[in-house]
Image (cartoon, rainbow, N blue to C red):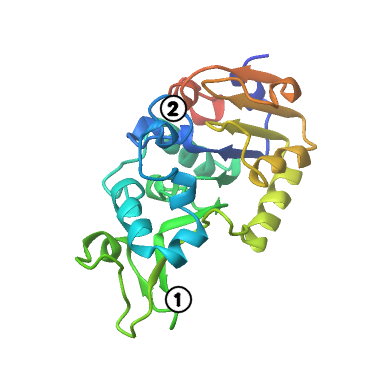
């Protein structure tokens, strides 16, 4: 069965996406050939983007974060736009994303569950005051500080930190209520996020990814390709 045919039979679609959803917007993934994990740094990216590094070596953390994790000029690609269109038409009930770039919201999606947080939310660890991402990007100090003197921390889930329980619960609820789940642009090797797929009890599980994943054998349809190209090729009768 084709993706077109599956979606024509779908009433409650949930989309679960990873870094591969945003690569067509010019944002590198982590594990691809040109991804962050294949570039040379003084320390592994997962070490720099850890809670320990944020606490003990904040200058190192923010230098890397400003250089690699703030793609504020990036624009939504065909995947983001198509998903937002499906939500407006009542087909898509939720987007669950491992990305922190905010491109789904920029494209117009309303129900977006951000498992790993967002670069667009930043808070003082002392007083809780909110700051936009431009504050961190443009602050000339090695470590961005609030007016109260506290460090301004991006609201993103670092290595060694747990996921937000409310976001996990909402994601599980959406997946359990879906009749079709599209999992795209993710290697499905990062837990606990990848484990959410096992809670799907609907009719069709579709995997779209450039490379093979450990869960390909569970899918009703596996598509090798770029997420934006695959989704933009679908024109549903309800969109005509």
Measured as percent of width and height from the top left, residue 159 is found at 54, 53
Measured as percent of width and height from the top left, residue 115 is found at 57, 52
79 or 193: which is nearer to us? 193
In screen coordinates, is 84 left or right of 148?
A: right
Measured as percent of width and height from the top left, residue 69 is found at 36, 49
In screen coordinates, is 71 left or right of 168?
A: left
Q: CA distance from mark 2 to mark 1?
A: 37 Å
116 or 180: which is nearer to us? 116
Residue with the most extreme top position: 1
Q: Nearer the viewer, mark 2 or mark 1?
A: 1
Q: For the residue labelled by badge 1, is the local secondary structure a helix, a strand or a loop?
A: loop
Mark linked to residue 228: 2
- Residue drawn 39% across and 79% down? 129
Question: Compared to 12, does 232 lie above or below?
Answer: above
47 or 139: which is nearer to us? 47
- Residue 109 seen by the camera: yes
In screen coordinates, is 158 left or right of 216?
A: left
| Total number of numbered discs in the rendering | 2
Mark linked to residue 125: 1
Crowd around label 1: few <14 · some 14–19 · many ≥20 (10 Å): some
Residue with the most extreme right position: 201
- Residue 91 seen by the camera: no
- Residue drawn 73% across and 52% down? 173
Q: Which numbered disc, 2 or 1, marks the residue that appears first in the sequence?
A: 1
Question: Compared to 12, does 229 lie above or below?
Answer: above
Measured as percent of width and height from the top left, residue 239 is found at 50, 30
Q: For the residue labelled by badge 2, is the local secondary structure a helix, a strand or a loop?
A: helix
């Amino acid at each position: 069965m084709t993706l077109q045919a599956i979606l024509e039979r779908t009433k409650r679609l949930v989309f679960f996406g990873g870094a591969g959803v945003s690569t067509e917007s010019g944002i590198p993934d982590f594990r691809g050939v040109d991804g962050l994990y294949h570039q040379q740094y003084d320390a592994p990216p997962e070490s720099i983007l850890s809670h320990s590094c944020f606490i003990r070596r904040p200058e190192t953390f923010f230098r890397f974060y400003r250089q690699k994790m703030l793609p504020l000029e990036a624009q939504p690609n065909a995947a983001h736009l198509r998903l937002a269109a499906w939500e407006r038409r009542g087909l898509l009930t939720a987007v669950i994303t491992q990305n922190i770039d905010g491109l789904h919201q920029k494209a117009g999606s309303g129900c977006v569950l951000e498992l790993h947080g967002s670069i667009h939310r930043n808070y003082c660890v002392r007083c809780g005051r909110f700051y936009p991402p431009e504050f961190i990007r443009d602050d000339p100090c090695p470590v961005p500080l609030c007016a109260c003197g506290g460090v301004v921390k991006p609201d993103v889930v670092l290595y060694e930190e747990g996921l937000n329980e409310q976001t996990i619960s909402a994601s599980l609820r959406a997946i359990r209520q879906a009749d079709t789940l599209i999992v795209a642009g993710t290697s499905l090797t990062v837990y606990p996020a990848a484990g959410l797929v096992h809670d799907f009890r609907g009719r069709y599980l579709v995997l779209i990814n450039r490379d093979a994943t450990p869960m390909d054998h569970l899918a009703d349809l596996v598509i090798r390709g770029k997420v934006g190209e695959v989704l933009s090729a679908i024109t549903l009768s309800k969109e005509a």
